[in-house]
Amino acid sequence: MSTFTTTDGTEIFYKDWGTGRPVVFSHGWPLNADAWDGQLRVVAENGFRGIAHDRRGHGRSGQPWQGNDMDTYADDLAALLDEMDIRDAVLVGHSTGGGEVARYIGRHGTSRVSKAVLLSAVPPLMLRTDANPDGLPIGAFDDIRAGVAANRSQFYQDLSDLFYGFNRPGAAVSQGMRDAFWLWSMQVGSKAAYDCVKQFSETDFTEDLKRFDIPTLVLHGDDDQIVPFVAAGPKSAELIKDATLKVYPGSPHGLYGDHEQEFDADLLAFIAD
């Protein structure tokens, strides 16, 4: 296993596949780097270097009591890039991972980064406020916390249907995908899972997005039941200079089937350009 240790003593696990220009993936909540295996393989098979880490508290990384906050997530990503001396990287963030990428750029700049990809990402802000009426009410996130605290195993099984749109009429439900989602989710410590809800829902990334000074591809399905399209993708694309927005009609939050194949093609075209 490849790991490094952060300044606060937390061990971070990462995968490093292939050679060439580095493409660094940040995963969503409550998953881990395994959720990116398909994309790591695709980029490595096409002449790039795929790198993905388990966020602290998730997967095979350490589960400290402290540090389950967006600033520390971004600093852990910075530590990974420093540890591996990564340069000219493409940062790819899905969902909460998109927030991690945004906060990384907001805190650490783009000296090691040449492009960014935000897929169904939580920025600029998920929470409904007077200034952000398209967001979700705080009660929606309170329900997530309650589910994690009460019976997280059943909660994650139920969440998988919304995540991949399996609850939609005519959806091609994959029990294997639901099982994989549950397995990845059960590997996150309950403390980290609970704390992270506040981070992905209440963190305002507006100023971080304004600091982007690299080409950025923003992609979002308009049937996303986890991160509402109207409050996320289009608004992020407006805030990021030199951003390109692509909408996936009818696509869910998670990558699966035709949606995953289309994203893979878009990702390869963007990083090869």
Image (tube, grey):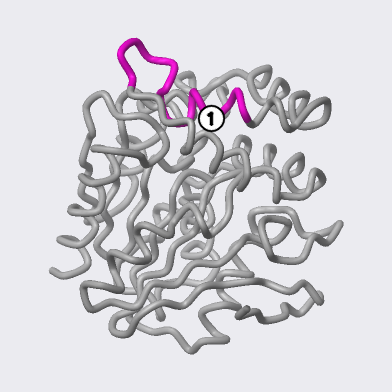
Compared to residue 27, the image places residue 88 above or below, namely: below
| Percent of width and height locating residue 204 | 56, 42
Q: Quadrant of residue 41?
A: bottom left
Closer to the camera in the image, 148 or 98: 148
| Percent of width and height locating residue 214 | 29, 66
Position of the C terminus by quadrant: bottom left
Q: Which residues are magenta?
A: 157-171
Examine the structure image and report whether residue 166 is included in the region drawn in magenta.
yes
**Residue at far front of view:** 176
Residue occupying image coordinates x 80% and y 43%: 190
Q: Quadrant of residue 111?
A: bottom left
| Percent of width and height locating residue 117 | 33, 56
**Residue at far right of view:** 65
- In the displayed structure, does residue 115 sit left or right of residue 120? left
Closer to the camera in the image, 193 or 103: 193
- In the displayed structure, does residue 262 sit left or right of residue 33? left
Residue occupying image coordinates x 24% and y 57%: 267
**Residue at far top of view:** 169
What's the residue type where badge 1 is placed? Ser
Compared to residue 14, the image places residue 233 above or below, namely: above
- In the displayed structure, does residue 185 sit left or right of residue 49? right
- In the displayed structure, does residue 22 sit left or right of residue 205? left
Residue occupying image coordinates x 23% and y 46%: 261
| Within-10-Å neighbours for mark 1: few <14, some 14–19, many 20+ | many
- The residue at which mark 1 appears reads as 160
